[in-house]
């Protein structure tokens, strides 16, 4: 235990002397948090909408106002429509000026007053399939409400569903994005610091002193791991504090499961960085490995942005061995759902298992290097 503590102190002393690693540990995670918090948006807003009103009556204007009252659409300025290059509504879509075009027929109000239903043509840009689906649902729901106001719908529904939004009634995106970003950030930066530290030991030749000393591979890895675990804890407090300050993210329930899960997840992250540092030959290779293996998978295959059920086979198999996936479940539960241990105990057990697996692989690789040298 004394050797592990000595190795940990040595790592912390080296860390304090490196200004670049200090920036990598605190400034870059904070920048990443702000990018994720303000840059990642899953809800469609400010959708450019063009309306061609061929009726020009109070009824058609009321329908137009109803569409814009949803606060999802943004009216295209008239000067864009007056350009000579725009010849048709289809060209508005083709040039990307509008994401949706609504064409109101000339007999719109007349057919409504006569009790019949008027057909409104809607052109939707489906380049982004998800946004196209959202636009379609918004137009459909708005038109249905407008029809009800003019009593154009058929007999009232026999079944009326009263919908209540659970856990996040205000539908704040930050309650989904910010806890998820903690998993990505705390997986990338502690592992990156650990990987760079171990690679520097190899490139500077100080790793040979470790091989010649009586310290074992287990003690060496644990000494480094505890040092960067302490740094990771400070990082976690740092970014979660900013998350609470800027986005008002607060615990939904008892946070002990998050505290335990964060410690285990940070250890997994450091162990992953140690494994990368053992295998990498230089700092560039270590950074590339962490970015490709760590960042891309935690960003795209962990459920941070895309639902896990939408990941196709065989990529969905990779998500089963990603620690970030299970920590994001723990984090979102703590900040949104609040079920506590009964909801995330299995994810914590998986994090423990994955951490032990990565540790054993790193220890065996380091032992082989010691024997070869």
Image (tube, rainbow, N blue to C red):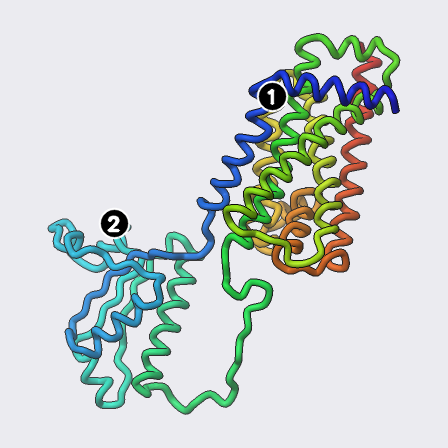
Task: Please rate how many residues cluster around mark 1, counting C-alpha atoms within 10 Å: few if below 14, some from 14 to 19, many from 20.
Answer: some
Q: Which numbered disc, 2 or 1, marks the residue closer to the eye?
A: 1
Residue at 80% x, 27% y: name it: 222
Residue at 76% x, 59% y: name it: 342
In this rendering, the answer to whether 147 lies above or below 352 is: below
Task: Please rate how many residues cluster around mark 2, counting C-alpha atoms within 10 Å: few if below 14, some from 14 to 19, many from 20.
Answer: few
Return the residue nearer the eye: 198 or 182. 182
Give the SS element for disc 2: loop
Residue at 64% x, 21% y: name it: 196
In this rendering, the answer to whether 318 lies above or below 193 is: below
Across and down, in percent, residue 64 comes to: 25, 70
> In which quarter of the view is residue 225 placed?
top right
Residue picked out by circle 2: 95
Nearer-N-terminus badge (2/1) = 2
Residue at 12% x, 54% y: name it: 82
> In which quarter of the view is residue 333 placed?
bottom right
Where the C terminus falls, by quadrant?
Answer: top right
Across and down, in percent, residue 289 comes to: 61, 27
> In which quarter of the view is residue 122 placed?
bottom left
Across and down, in percent, residue 220 comes to: 80, 21
Give the SS element for disc 1: helix
Where the N terminus falls, by quadrant?
Answer: top right
Return the residue nearer the eye: 349 or 313. 349
In this rendering, the answer to whether 356 lies above or below 176 is: above
Q: In this view, does 49 lie to the left or right of 188?
A: left
Across and down, in percent, residue 213 comes to: 85, 10
In this rendering, the answer to whether 9 lies above or below 52 is: above
Q: In this view, does 89 lie to the left or right of 309?
A: left
Residue at the front extreme? 245
Residue picked out by circle 1: 285
Q: Are marks 2 and 1 in contact (CB under 8 Å)?
A: no
Q: How far apart are marks 2 and 1 (CA)?
A: 42 Å
């Amino acid at each position: 235990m004394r050797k592990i503590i000595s190795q940990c102190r040595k790592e912390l002393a080296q860390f304090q002397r490196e200004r670049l690693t200090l920036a990598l540990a605190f400034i870059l995670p904070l920048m990443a948090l702000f990018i994720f918090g303000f840059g990642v948006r899953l809800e469609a807003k400010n959708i450019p909408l063009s309306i061609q009103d061929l009726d020009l009556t109070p009824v058609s204007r009321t329908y137009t106002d109803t569409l814009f009252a949803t606060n999802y659409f943004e009216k295209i300025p008239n000067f864009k429509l007056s350009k000579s290059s725009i010849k048709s509504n289809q060209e508005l879509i083709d040039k990307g000026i509008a994401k949706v075009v609504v064409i109101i027929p000339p007999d719109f109000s007349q057919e409504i007053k006569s009790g019949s239903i008027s057909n409104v043509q809607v052109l939707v840009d489906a380049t982004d399939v998800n946004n196209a689906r959202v636009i379609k649902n918004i137009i459909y729901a708005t038109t249905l409400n407008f029809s009800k106001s003019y009593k154009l719908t058929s007999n009232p529904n026999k079944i009326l569903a009263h919908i209540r939004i659970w856990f996040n009634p205000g539908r704040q995106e930050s309650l989904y994005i910010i806890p998820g970003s903690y998993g990505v950030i705390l997986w990338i930066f502690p592992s990156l610091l650990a990987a760079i530290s171990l690679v520097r030991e190899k490139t500077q030749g100080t790793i040979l002193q470790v091989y010649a000393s009586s310290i074992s591979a287990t003690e060496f890895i644990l000494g480094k791991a505890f040092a960067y675990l302490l740094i990771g804890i400070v990082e976690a407090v740092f970014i979660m504090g900013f998350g609470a300050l800027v986005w008002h993210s607060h615990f939904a329930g008892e946070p002990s499961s998050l505290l335990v899960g964060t410690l285990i997840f940070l250890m997994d992250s450091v162990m992953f960085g140690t494994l990368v540092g053992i295998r990498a030959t230089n700092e560039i290779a270590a950074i590339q490995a962490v970015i490709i293996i760590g960042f891309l998978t935690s960003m795209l295959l962990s459920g941070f942005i895309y639902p896990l059920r939408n990941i196709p086979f065989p990529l969905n198999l990779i998500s089963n061995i990603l620690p970030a996936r299970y920590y994001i479940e723990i984090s979102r539960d703590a900040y949104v759902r609040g079920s506590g241990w009964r909801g995330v105990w299995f994810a914590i057990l998986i994090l423990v298992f994955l951490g032990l697996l990565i540790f054993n692989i790193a220890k065996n690789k380091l032992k082989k290097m010691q024997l070869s040298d």
